[in-house]
Image (cartoon, grey):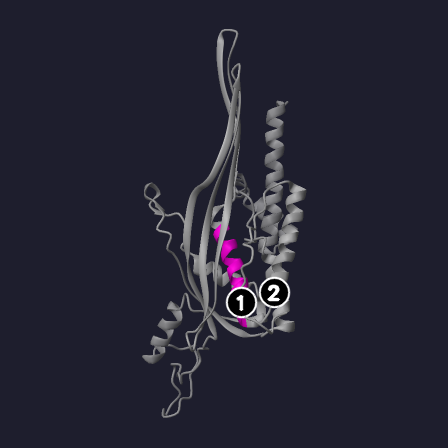
Amino acid sequence: MLAPHEMQRTTAIVLKSAVTLVCLAALSACTATEVAKAALDDEPQLAAFLATAGPPVTRNTTPLDPAFSCMSGRIKNFGRSGVRIASGEILDLTGKYIEAEGGSIVTKGGAHMVMSALGKLGDSITLLERVGTEIADKELAYIDRRQLGDGTEQVVPGEEEPVPWLPYFGGTVLRSDYYIVGAITEVNFNIASGGAEATISGFGLRASTLTMNVAVDLRIVDSVSLEVVGTTSLQKQIVGEEVGADVFRFFGDYLFDLNTGARSQEPLQLAVRTTLELAVLELISSVTDTDHETCVAAAEAAVTDAVKAARIDPVVVRPAGQSTRRSGGSL
């Protein structure tokens, strides 16, 4: 007969194994029969995997995802659809790093976050690669040296016999209409903090809050004239909360010193991603003649409703009065 705590632990392991097995079935597109057969044929290895498997992989969504879907539809229906957009480098210029951890505080993947944000606009724009062109550059060099092929022979003008290398006549790389460039420019710690603590007869309670922020400065540039079409500077505040309780008392001949608490804070890099996404929406609106504010307001309203339901702090903080729209032609 299992003790209650052992029974709870066993039940949790069984449930975790069942959920993980379902996830494995979905990811591998296997039928339930195939998964069950694999479990029987390779039970020790599967059991070891299930014992260490954590939560399943999920999409890295942000509260602004609905705004991108809305914006995509507005561009296709009312704006300049198909504008060719690329991203340049989005550098970490905060100058903040943690020497003990050997790295920067802010992500160096800003350009990739901007590319992912542009990808959320779907086919309403044409997204061009300018960040990771190493493979394309190498293959163009192989073509130039007549080393690149596709496994078939090509008929090339000027050659008597078909050749195994691919010819290149130029002009296959599409030019961009605009590109986004800029930097993550600020990380400010402890811009506001507060707290309270009280202890009575060995029983104590404490609570504290800490506010920091990050800021980005981006611009969108005409690729032909290098005219700066629009700029934006956005900041995002991040609030951390901590609550706790302490007990320090004698019970009989024994002294008890017990501490418990909880701490929560929005991830710093998620704040950077969300700020970059809002900047992308503002900049794209300036070159597609489409108003982004309606879409952002709808997304914020959805977040506010969720916040009220869950009684948590909002994730999106939208600076008031900032817009990069062109005058006229916007909807």
Tag 2 residue: 71
222 is higher (above) or lower (below) than 312: below
Which badge, 1 or 2, is on the more N-terminal residue?
A: 2
102 is higher (above) or lower (below) than 297: above
Q: Given the image, on which type of amino acid does mark 1 rest?
A: Ile
Rounded to the nearest whole Å, what is the CA distance between mark 1 and mark 2? 9 Å
Q: Nearer the viewer, residue 273 or 149?
A: 273
Q: Are marks 1 and 2 in contact (CB under 8 Å)?
A: yes
Q: Nearer the viewer, residue 23 or 63?
A: 63
Q: Is residue 155 visible?
A: yes
Tag 1 residue: 284
Residue at image coords 37%, 68% = 134
Tell me where the magenta segment starts and ends, as one range.
Answer: 271-287
Q: Is residue 52 visible?
A: no
306 is higher (above) or lower (below) than 292: above
Magenta region, mostly helix, strand or loop? helix
Check if residue 227 falls in the magenta segment: no
- Secondary structure under tag 1 reads helix
Check if residue 284 falls in the magenta segment: yes
Q: Given the image, on which type of amino acid does mark 2 rest?
A: Met
- Secondary structure under tag 2 reads helix
Q: Position of residue 40 (x, y in %)?
A: 59, 44
Q: Position of residue 265 (x, y in %)?
A: 51, 41
Badge 1: residue crowd in 10 Å (few <14, some 14–19, many ≥20): many
